[in-house]
Amino acid sequence: MKEPKIKILVGYHKPATLLKSDIFTPIHLGRAVTLDESKDGALDADDLKWMQENMIGDDTGDHISNLNRTVNELTAFYWAWKNPDKLDNPDYIGFMHYRRHLSFADEKLPEKEKQTFDQMYETFALDDEYLQKTRLNNDEKITNKCADYDVVIKSRHRLPGTPYQHYEHNREGHTKIKDYDTVLRILAEKYPSFIKYSEKYNSGKFAYFTNIIIMKSELFYQYCEWLFDIIFETQKQIDISNYSAQEARACAYISEWLMGIYITYLYNATDKKILELQGTYIENSDYGVIPAIKPAFARNNVPVVFACEGDFYLYTGVAISSLIKNASSNYNYDILIFADPEALKKKNLLLSLAENYDNINIRLINALSFIDNHTNNLLFVSHHLRKSAYYRLLASAILSNYDKTLYLDSDIVIHKDAAQLFNTDLENNIIAAVLDVGVHIGFHTNVWHQQYLLFRLKLENPYNYFNSGILVMNLKKIRYERIERRFFDKLAELKNPNFWDQDVLNCVCEGNVKFLDIKWNHQFSPPYQTPNCANDCPTKLIKEYIVNIDDHYITHFTDWFKPWLEPRKTLAEHFWRYARNTSFYDEIIQKNIGKISQNTINDIYWLMREIYYSNKLAYDKRRYKILYLLSFGRVKKYKEKYNKAKRRLKELKRRLSW
């Protein structure tokens, strides 16, 4: 028996990880209206070029591509229906989304706990591991599964109510029940034999969502004829002129309910064989969409990398502004921002910083393109740390055409030409960095820090522990010696390091670090974490740190002491001096004004708390001194408690005076 030919269209509206094979055909949805605004914005020239180079469009032959903003993926259904010859006249035609697929695995894949009605297998990236688990890389497996059935569809979902109620009370508020009522009336008028199947489906407890389906071609054509007859009539009868961009997609939403009605009809009125398969969902649809990143300038190119996630673009913008302010006309500055999808939405704002500068080039790079499932599972994050902190570990892979780069955290301002830092002779070391003052103090004064650095990280010399916020990176050496693999092996070993990627870099790079002048990374937080650090930790590094408080090249607002939250702290004025001259200033104020007020309350709370404890310690000090004297010095514990209270009181007084 001849194997059936299967073609499954995979719908895309923006660059995303490609699912492409003899069976899977990526299709650009709405290509005819690419330059029009949508709920996701408009594609820029580079994204459109990528889409044109990597997939077909829905705008050839007989098409409705121009209706995409209101019917969504139905433009692909219509195109396949009217242009089967462009798919080589297959025996089966299907549709999936760029991040939603079917699993063809024999076993059910694990589903997340506490999911809503939409049960599915979820994973981070569409990579080889995912393709193997779902068997989407096995054309023979897919063909054999489909061959015995007329329809293969994403499995039904159990609802808390009925499909009708779900449309009426959609939790996102994008659907209007009057539109669905109009469709049900049109269905009854045009196809009265479907009324009982419509009633059965709409009063049931299950639904079919997402329009993911594979059908024998003849059945697919029959379904499309029925579907579009209803959809086109619906477009004539409902008024969407005052709808939002989401609400205007009414016909797209309705088509999912119509598919449920049609499947109910097939189950109850025909002998068609239907297979329901587990659905899947991809969180990071950007993996593998990798642009060729080459130096922006042929001569005197100074690459500078920043990492940016979410609303941190505001502070990245201030940092870049300070770099530009102190740039030299003798160099060209190639600024590369490793960004997440949220930060990428602010692309134009960040690019505008380079306007009017011939020697400044800014590009945003989607760092998630380089993170697969294995890597993502290793990235330990917390409330204080974002995933973007790990982007520096991927710098050698992302910047494969660069031998060297600066890597700068976004919570900094720069007071000197960054080219001077870039020109540091690395002397074949992996990186150049500045010692971490806070960790240095911790190791000198805190037993926990000593044990962590010596026994968990197993550092030979913890006094060489550096801060990873300002780095000069030897990308050529990292690639040649495959050091990136060692980074992630160490991360897997540590699992949940206390100082995240910084611990990894210190472990792997120990003995291969060139130490920079402390002026290149003046860390903001140590005086607030340890107010009397000069006396408690009288080392050469601390002395250098204190001497350079008012004379350094980069102010690094480390830890949780951020100038936009603590504007009254020493050195915060450096940040505001640059921020005031950017387009980000008003938004920074607006986003943080409430937090600043809360911090003021917190400051008062902690001040009152410390005053209370200082009074209590003063009482304890007097009490234990008297008890010790009354015991004629025989009860040693009184003396120990007296000395302890005395030390703690002294420390509190220092903090209060600070």
Image: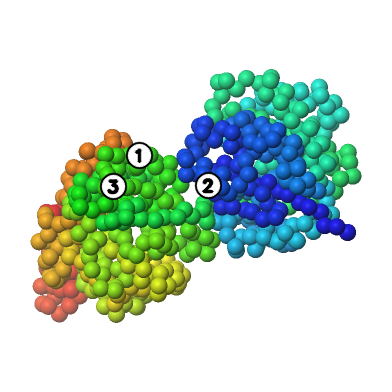
Sequence order check: which comes first, mark 2 or mark 1? 2
Q: Position of residue 131 (x, y in %)?
A: 63, 60
Q: Which quadrant would residue 137 be assigned to in this image?
A: bottom right
What is the secondary structure assignment of the residue under circle 3?
strand
Which residue is denoted by mark 3 in the rendering? 360
Q: Kindly identify which numbered label has been placed on residue 379.
A: none
Q: Position of residue 552 (x, y in %)?
A: 15, 57
**Type of the residue with mark 3:** Ile
Q: Looking at the image, which residue is at 70% across and 61% down? A: 138
Q: Give the camera-side residue of 324 and 301.
A: 301
* SS for dot 1: helix
Quarter placement of the C terminus: bottom left
Q: Amino acid at mark 2?
A: Trp
Q: Position of residue 558 (x, y in %)?
A: 26, 56
**Against 526, is 324 above or below?**
above
Numbered label tally: 3
Name the residue tied to disc 2: 50
Give the numbered dot on residue 349.
1
Q: Amino acid at mark 1?
A: Leu
User: How far is mark 2 from mark 1, CA to CA?
Assistant: 23 Å
Rendered image coloring scheme: rainbow
**Mark 2 crowdedness (10 Å alpha carbons): few <14, some 14-19, many ≥20:** some
